Image (spheres, helix red, strand yellow):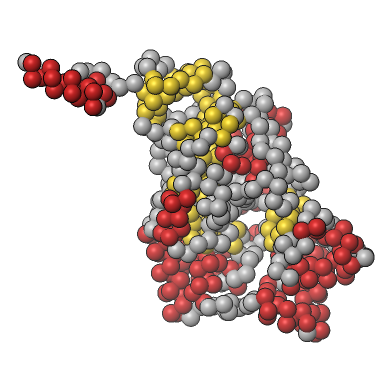
Amino acid sequence: MRFLFLLLAFIGLSYPGLAQELLGAKPPLDMIIRNALIVDGTGAAAFEGSVGIREGRITALGAVKESAKAELDAQGRVVAPGFIDVHTHSENICKLPEAENFLRMGVTTIVTGNCGMSRTDVAAFFKEIEKAKVSLHVGALVGHGAVREQGMGGRFIRAPTAEQLEAMKALVEQGMKDGALGMSTGLIYVPGSFAKTEEIIELAKVVARYDGVYASHMRYETSRIFSALDELTSIAREAQVRTELSHIKLSGPSAWGRADEVLAYLDKARAEGLRITHDQYAYTASSTGLRQTIPDAALEGTREDFVARVNDPARKAEIIHGMKEILSRSGRTDYSYAVIARFAADPSLNGLTIPAAAKRVRGADSLEDQIELLLDIEKRGGGSGVFHGMSEEDLRRFLKHPHTMIASDGGPRLLGEDVPHPRSYGNNARILSRYVREQKVLTLEEAVCRMTSLPAETFGMKDRGVLKPGAWADLVIFDLEKVQDMSEFNDPHHYSEGFTDVLVDGVPVIREGKLTEARPGGPLRR
């Protein structure tokens, strides 16, 4: 008996939690969040209660009577699953491992490698993320464009040879084995724009074998969108792959007003058995490279190849004609809708519209001068822009659809650098402030579902995106009346407000509005 007493005493000193369990008492929870308005991510009605957390997971929800090492009084604020942003461009996450712009709008998980652009060595990328000790979870897609570039050696205006296609399939398969969530395409970008549908189907079949997701920036988002939808559904059907339509939109005045037709097309495809979802950001402007104003054929190969084409008067005339055709098809007469976000060769132009920049550089803002400026920007290393090209009414119609997820299309941002799209700072906050609180396009529960359980289910993230016992404790606490996106197009570098606390696997990364030093995140493997 004395031996048993001494043994329990030793265990109690060395392993207090185990001693309590041997004696029939559970160890205290790591944290209890009390006085919360719980929105569990499923779309169910909010309810008042508490959340118990132990060892990174939720242990109890509602009435929590256990003791805890720490308590957090939510004071009636919303407690929801951490937001999951499935469409980001975060290949630079290791350089900005805090990803504070994401945390401060409630995002605890991101998916990078979208629009066909990614690292092709997923295992190496994940190792770098582990070494960098990032704040949030990072999932990855294998980018078709990157695979095509590596597999085809730099010349793309053709189909791959049989050997090249096998090499590309091997890259995708290795990425899936290493934990990628799927494959993305960017079919408006070189080299993806030169790929035929049959090539993409063969690669998507590899993804389907691992039950991954095929996420596509479609070939057209303009008045030709139904041709792009035909291709998207053909790939989904032939490859039997789960499919995600990236940043659903109608770009350019000539395409506006057809949101209901697009949604009806997708609903019909789903009724026929195709597994298709879509994501959307909360702005009527997009952001991408300024080279998208230039015909693809002019961009094939190296930048030196491009310069040589522009220096040839006949080829240059063809390029200019193509640029004017692109403008005309979109229903525009000039580039006043485009703003320079980043031009490393001349940062003084950042934040200016193309006509204003042409006026500054060339002394005139005619269409010809605007085109010359865009060609010069590409010759001098290229740049990125913000493009104001969507309808607010179309945005709201897409947003109301139950299969629409919320995703920023942004990335980690360094305060004060360039003049980027505000979505990287404010996307989730804008959904909650503008489209839930102010316009009531969505209910709070619907919006949270679109930012949590729907993306988690679509991308196969087990035990994430919902608040329930056993799920990982990725949590965000916010005051719906105070949530606000502070980032604006002409002044983007401001964090969102109203998010007081953010936890990743039960560890506070934002506490009482302040960034902590904790970095509990890492790779999120399929």
Number of numbered discs: 0
Q: Is residue 229 above or below residue 408?
A: below
- In the figure, 515 relative to 271: above or below? above
The residue at 67%/24% (across/down) is 481
Location of residue 402 in the rendering, given as x and y in whole percent from the top left corner: 57, 40
Query: Is any atom of residue 453 visible in this view?
Result: no
User: Is 162 or 230 nearer to us in this picture?
Assistant: 162
Residue 268 percent location from the top left of the image = 56, 50
Residue 10: tell me if it is visible: yes
Q: Residue furthest right?
A: 364
Relative horizontal placement of residue 174, taking residue 215 as reference (left or right): left
- In the image: residue 5, left or right of residue 318: left
Quarter holding residue 505: top left
On the image, the x and y values in percent for residue 209 come to 38, 59
- Can you tell which quarter of the image residue 83 is in? top right
In the rendered image, which quarter contains the N terminus? Answer: top left
